Image (spheres, coloured by chain):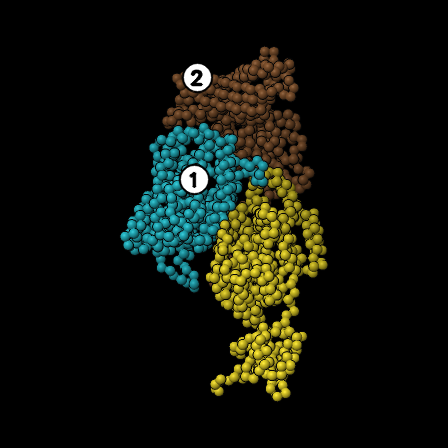
């Protein structure tokens, strides 16, 4: 060590004192032996495992009773880290490390404690036959869960620089080296590095930060809570982005079909799962096209329908005082309110809201002659078939999309519906997810 | 860039304002389910057009009885329709018009001129059903049969293959009739609908040739014609000869014809019938099936020949022999057509029937 | 062999057999259509063979790059520009006829300007997408509509009211003298292989050589396609009546009905499917035209956006909007005839240029 260069401790200590002295839960402890040898510990009480610090560090110090030997004890600990620079040390303290100032050396030991490592039940993407547990909010617990589902030596875990200037959230990248395309991995890393947001608290938020498109309707990264889906996607060569403190991960690159598949598809017999997939696409089409097709047919080309059907619709629309698009819009918005309300409400009152809204309102509206019976059927069909889309983000996107189709159909009839549909296909095709085309038929399974 | 978004948004909004035409709700339209064209009583020119308009009822149980007949007179159909429009508040919608009924008296007029309006309009279905109303179209349209869920539903159920099937009903779609009118070598035909109190009866038909008087076929001829034209096989034949009397239920029936182009041209018409005996007034013997076959053949042959000769005598050709002749010869169409016109009145018609009775039912 | 190549060929076959091409063919149905069709198919298959295989000698490269590399600059600039213009013309024809069809059959009250802008608002951004992306969109649209369209074609064939004698009459004129108009029109529906001039860029690694039997397969598909497009309207509307319709195929689709379907009238299914197909077809030809024209200008960027394609597309949009207002339907029809005939010679020329380029590339 050269004399003109300050020792590690001399560099670090003023920084630490400046940063943390005023903080209530920051601790600066000095332990001294009989021979006046001292070591200093710096940590933040609230992020480390407070209960065990005595057992792990204080007691051995006095038992060993020798600085040199204690130093090597510290070095032997599993979460030991060498000193890099001042900034790194500050960061480490914030992430639950204990900093040891022993003589002129600075050591760090990760001693993090998190309260959120319980594994949660799958609640967003439920399956009947699949695993019932989802991820936890702890990144290490999650890694543990995934490792147990994917025993493969080529599974790589990479720590990325923390995200958010303020939140400094830990982000991990997970991929199977053998399966994943290295180009895509690099692309993901670059994007994550570029993401700049002061605070990131959910996977969706990170998703927003990761895409270079500012205004986005369709999800290009999949958010999931299911370890089995993660394992399956690892096998498919996808990259998983894990975020500290969130029981969801981001999967990329994901294409349209990924959002239309449920893990259930793998757990059912072949034909059953094919049937389910077909059902899902029918649901998608119904929820997208039914309202606009209704307006287009009713108000522009009633000759499309069979005469019997045309007459029953005309009959049921007789008492309705306003044009068809208002009727559709009114009922659809009521339905959206109902869905939103039942998400926000506490679980105990949720069912009441749906009963009041769905049954009573619907019945009363037809009795009052504000909407036609057929309309109630259509709205119900749209709502139900929208819920059949397995990934939440996609079903939200489609919910918005149907209004765009409705607008263009209202103004230009069935021709507008076709043009809008082609436009939608173009838009989906135009999108890509980390360089992968978003919508492409017959994507060969990439290995 | 942001301004560009806003600008394009504004532009799109303006474009949307351009439209909003043609938006008319289903309940603001009056659906015409049937149209009747009649001749005016006194004057020679002009038509009386009757529209049958259905009104949707808000209660599903009330459906059916709600219709209105509106008539107007005009020198052309379009003019008459314009007068009707003045009497109706709602937009007239011809998109669901399934029945076109032409008054019997119109047939003697130039039918092609009458049909012109129907084929020109885009909103009239090409698969609308055509028929002749006797004594006039208005009477047929005003019939109110029992148990009708939709106005006119019963009438088009007659012609529709999804409804009743009767050997007397000939179905003619608008496009077919138009084709037959224009086509050289094939003449059109229409079923004749008569009203019987609360119901219809369709048993006869008219064969129509451009610029000539229509030929009305009677009940029996209609039945034979349907056999020849459509190979209609859901029917029974009556055989009554040589102290035998039985009904033959037809299982399958095939017709085919050829024009022999030898020195003396002739039409060879072949019919294959297969069936079982359905009803008999005298005792049948099992060993005598051959004889019964022969009897059937003879009876049937006579009927067919009679009908074909009637067509030949009146120089009308609904079967399409002329078209077949044109399809068999090369050369300019005009010449072929002239040749055929000369040939048809003299051509020999040779009918051959092969009957095969496969059984006598479940008793002997 | 990449499936995308076949998609392009099939797309062009489908997109062009309902609007202008069948009208031209049916107009000359009694004047050597069959011989014209056969000549057209042979000529186009030869073009197809020469052109495709020459392009495939340059894997991963589009026609602009190839021409620029081996030809003098003045020639390549003029040549590529003219080719681009030709592609824009074919986009324009598709656009015009479908705007007209929309107005005639779906919504007569919608303003033309509005429909035009609506179509262009989708087609232009579509054409600005990456070359590969247009292929994906094409695949989706084709996979959705192809089975339904084939179903409708088959249904047309098994329609019992189809008059086969009328169809046979067309064949009696097989050996009449062919006409250049009809050869041009018939060959136009087979010209999908030209699209490879740009799409060769993204078909790399997949396409080796267009073998003879694949050529025959394309030929058979072309023959079936073009004869369907000619014969079905004749069979349905009669050999003498088929000529009366402006859009024979849509009038033909209206004569079909699905007795037990949700929608009874086939016309609407057919129309909506064809609007989709024509849009993707317009997008792809517009994309190719754009790539050709783009290649002769240097890349100019304004705020990170390449503006040459935007300018070209805007000019095209303005041109097509103006075109609709300046030209009547009959003028467009006559212009299309000239255009199709012109393409026949342009095809020979472009094949010759490409063969020359292949020779020069071998010498180097």
The nearer-to-camera label among 1 and 2 is: 1
Q: Quarter-wise, where is residue A21 in the image? A: bottom right
At 49% from the left and 55% from the top, the residue drawn is A446
Q: Residues within 10 Å of mark 2 (few under 14, many from 20)?
A: few
Spatial CA span between label 1 and label 2: 45 Å
Query: Which residue occupies the foreground of this view, B84 or C311?
Result: C311
Q: Which residue is mark 2?
A: B346
Q: Position of residue C101 (x, y in %)?
A: 47, 42
Quadrant of residue C33 in the image? top left
Q: Position of residue C261 (x, y in %)?
A: 57, 38
Marks 1 and 2 share the same chain = no
The label number, if any, that marks residue C221 in the structure image: 1
Identify the secondary structure beneath mark 2: helix
> What percent of the width, then of the height, locates residue C361?
30, 52
Q: Relative to B341, is C104 above or below? A: below
Quarter residue C10 falls in: top left
Instruction: Report the front residue among C275 and A93.
Output: A93
- Inspect this view and state whether residue A291 appears: no
Position of residue C78 in the picture relative to residue A374 (left or right): left
Residue displayed at 41% across by 59% down: C307
- Chain identifier for the yellow-coloured part of the image: A
Q: Chain of mark 1?
A: C
Query: Percent from the top left, x then y, of residue C240?
Result: 43, 30
Most extreme residue toward the left is C363
Q: Colour of chain C?
A: cyan
Q: Colour of chain B?
A: brown
Q: Residue at left 42%, top 22%? A: B340
Marks 1/2 in contact by CB < 8 Å: the verdict is: no
Q: C4 left or right of B80?
A: left
């Amino acid at each position: 060590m050269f004399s003109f260069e300050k020792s590690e401790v001399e560099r670090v200590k003023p920084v630490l004192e400046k940063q943390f002295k005023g903080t209530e839960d920051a601790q600066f402890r000095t332990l001294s032996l009989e021979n006046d040898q001292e070591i200093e510990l710096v940590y933040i009480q609230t992020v480390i495992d407070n209960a065990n610090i005595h057992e792990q560090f204080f007691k051995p110090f006095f038992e060993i009773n020798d600085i040199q030997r204690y130093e090597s004890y510290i070095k032997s600990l599993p979460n030991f880290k060498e000193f890099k620079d001042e900034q790194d040390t500050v960061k480490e303290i914030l992430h639950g490390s204990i900093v040891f100032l022993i003589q002129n050396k600075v050591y760090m030991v990760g001693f993090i404690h998190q309260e959120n490592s319980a594994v949660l039940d799958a609640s967003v993407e439920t399956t009947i036959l699949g695993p019932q547990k989802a991820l936890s909010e702890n990144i290490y617990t999650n890694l543990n869960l995934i490792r147990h589902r994917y025993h493969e030596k080529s599974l790589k875990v990479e720590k990325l620089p923390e995200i958010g200037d303020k939140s400094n959230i830990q982000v991990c990248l997970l991929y199977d080296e053998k399966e994943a395309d290295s180009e895509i991995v690099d692309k993901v890393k670059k994007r994550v590095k570029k993401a700049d947001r002061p605070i990131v608290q959910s996977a969706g938020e990170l998703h927003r930060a990761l895409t270079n498109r500012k205004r986005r309707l369709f999800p290009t990264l999949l958010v999931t809570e299911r370890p089995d889906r993660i394992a399956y996607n690892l096998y498919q060569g996808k990259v998983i982005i894990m975020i500290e403190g969130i029981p969801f991960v981001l999967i990329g690159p994901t294409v349209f079909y990924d959002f239309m598949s449920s893990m259930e598809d793998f757990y059912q017999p072949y034909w059953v799962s094919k049937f389910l997939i077909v059902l899902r696409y029918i649901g998608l089409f119904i929820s997208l096209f039914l309202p606009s097709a209704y307006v287009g047919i009713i108000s522009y080309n009633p000759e499309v329908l069979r005469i019997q059907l045309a007459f029953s619709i005309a009959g049921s629309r007789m008492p309705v005082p306003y044009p068809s698009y208002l009727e559709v819009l009114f009922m659809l918005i009521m339905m959206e309110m109902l869905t939103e309300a039942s998400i926000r409400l506490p679980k105990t009152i949720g069912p009441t809201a749906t009963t009041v809204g769905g049954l009573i309102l619907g019945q009363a509206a037809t009795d009052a002659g504000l909407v036609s019976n057929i309309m109630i059927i259509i709205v119900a069909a749209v709502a139900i078939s929208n819920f059949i889309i397995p990934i939440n983000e996609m079903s939200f996107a489609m919910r918005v999309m149907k209004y765009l189709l409705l607008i263009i159909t209202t103004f230009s009839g069935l021709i507008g519906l076709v043009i809008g549909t082609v436009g939608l296909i173009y838009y989906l095709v135009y999108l890509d997810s980390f360089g992968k085309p978003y919508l492409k038929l017959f994507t060969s399974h990439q290995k | 860039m942001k301004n560009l978004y806003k600008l394009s948004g504004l532009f799109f909004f303006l474009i949307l304002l351009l439209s909003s035409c043609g938006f008319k709700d289903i309940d603001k339209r009056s659906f015409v389910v049937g149209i009747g064209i009649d001749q005016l009583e006194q004057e020679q020119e002009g038509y009386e057009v009757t529209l049958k308009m259905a009104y949707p009822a808000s209660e599903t149980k009330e459906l059916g009885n709600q219709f209105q007949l509106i008539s107007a007179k005009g020198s052309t159909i379009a003019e008459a329709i314009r007068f009707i429009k003045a009497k109706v508040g709602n937009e007239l919608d011809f998109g669901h018009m399934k029945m076109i009924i032409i008054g019997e008296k119109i047939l003697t007029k130039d039918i092609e001129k009458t049909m012109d309006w129907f084929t020109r309009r885009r909103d009239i279905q090409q698969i609308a059903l055509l028929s002749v109303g006797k004594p006039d179209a208005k009477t047929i349209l005003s019939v109110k049969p029992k148990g009708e869920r939709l106005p006119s539903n019963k009438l088009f159920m007659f012609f529709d293959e999804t409804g009743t099937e009767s050997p007397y009903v000939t179905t003619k779609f608008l496009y077919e009739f138009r084709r037959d009118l224009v086509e050289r070598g094939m003449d059109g035909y229409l079923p004749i609908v008569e009203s019987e109190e609360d119901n219809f009866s369709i048993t006869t038909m008219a064969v129509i040739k451009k610029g000539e008087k229509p030929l009305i076929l009677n009940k029996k001829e209609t039945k034979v014609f349907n056999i020849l034209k459509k190979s209609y096989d859901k029917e029974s034949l009556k055989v009554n000869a040589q102290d035998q009397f039985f009904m033959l239920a037809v299982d399958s029936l095939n017709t085919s014809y050829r024009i022999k182009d030898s020195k003396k041209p002739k039409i060879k018409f072949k019919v294959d019938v297969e069936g079982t005996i359905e009803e008999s007034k005298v005792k049948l013997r099992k060993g005598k099936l051959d004889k019964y076959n022969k009897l059937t053949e003879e009876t049937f042959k006579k009927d067919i020949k009679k009908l074909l000769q009637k067509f030949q005598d009146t120089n009308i050709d609904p079967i399409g022999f002329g078209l077949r002749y044109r399809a068999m010869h090369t050369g300019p169409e005009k010449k072929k057509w002239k040749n055929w016109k000369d040939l048809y009145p003299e051509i020999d018609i040779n009918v051959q029937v092969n009957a095969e009775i496969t059984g006598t039912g479940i008793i002997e | 062999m990449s499936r995308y190549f076949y998609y392009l060929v099939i797309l062009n076959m489908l997109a062009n057999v309902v609007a202008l091409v069948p009208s031209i063919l049916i107009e000359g149905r009694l004047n050597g259509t069959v011989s014209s069709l056969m000549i057209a198919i042979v000529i186009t298959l030869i073009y197809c063979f020469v052109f495709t295989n020459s392009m495939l000698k340059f894997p991963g490269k589009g026609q602009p790059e190839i021409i620029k590399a081996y030809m003098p600059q003045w020639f390549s600039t003029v040549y590529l520009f003219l080719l681009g213009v030709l592609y824009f013309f074919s986009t324009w024809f598709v656009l015009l006829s479908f705007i007209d069809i929309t107005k005639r059959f779906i919504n007569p009250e919608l303003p033309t300007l509005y429909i035009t802008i609506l179509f262009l608002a989708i087609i232009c951004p579509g054409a600005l997408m990456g070359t590969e992306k247009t292929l994906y969109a094409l695949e989706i649209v084709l996979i959705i509509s192809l089975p339904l369209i084939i179903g409708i074609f088959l249904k047309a064939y098994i329609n019992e009211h189809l008059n086969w004698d009328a169809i046979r009459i067309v064949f009696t004129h097989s050996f009449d003298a062919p006409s250049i108009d009809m050869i041009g029109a018939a060959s136009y529906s087979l010209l999908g292989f030209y699209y490879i001039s740009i799409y060769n860029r993204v078909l790399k690694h997949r396409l080796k050589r267009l073998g003879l039997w694949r050529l025959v397969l394309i030929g058979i598909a072309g023959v079936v396609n073009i004869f369907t497009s000619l014969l079905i309207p004749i069979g349905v509307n009669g050999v003498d009546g088929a000529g009366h319709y402006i859009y024979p195929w849509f009038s033909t689709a209206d004569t079909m009905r699905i007795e037990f379907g949700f929608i009874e009238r086939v016309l609407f299914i057919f129309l909506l499917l064809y609007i989709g197909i024509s849009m993707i077809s317009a997008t792809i030809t517009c994309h190719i035209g754009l790539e050709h024209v783009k290649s002769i200008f240097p890349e100019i960027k304004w705020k990170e956006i390449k503006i040459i394609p935007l300018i070209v597309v805007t000019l095209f949009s303005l041109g097509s909007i103006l075109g609709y207002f300046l030209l009547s339907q009959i003028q467009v029809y006559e212009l299309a005839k000239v255009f199709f005939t012109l393409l026949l010679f342009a095809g020979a020329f472009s094949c010759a240029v490409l063969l020359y380029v292949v020779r020069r590339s071998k010498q180097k």
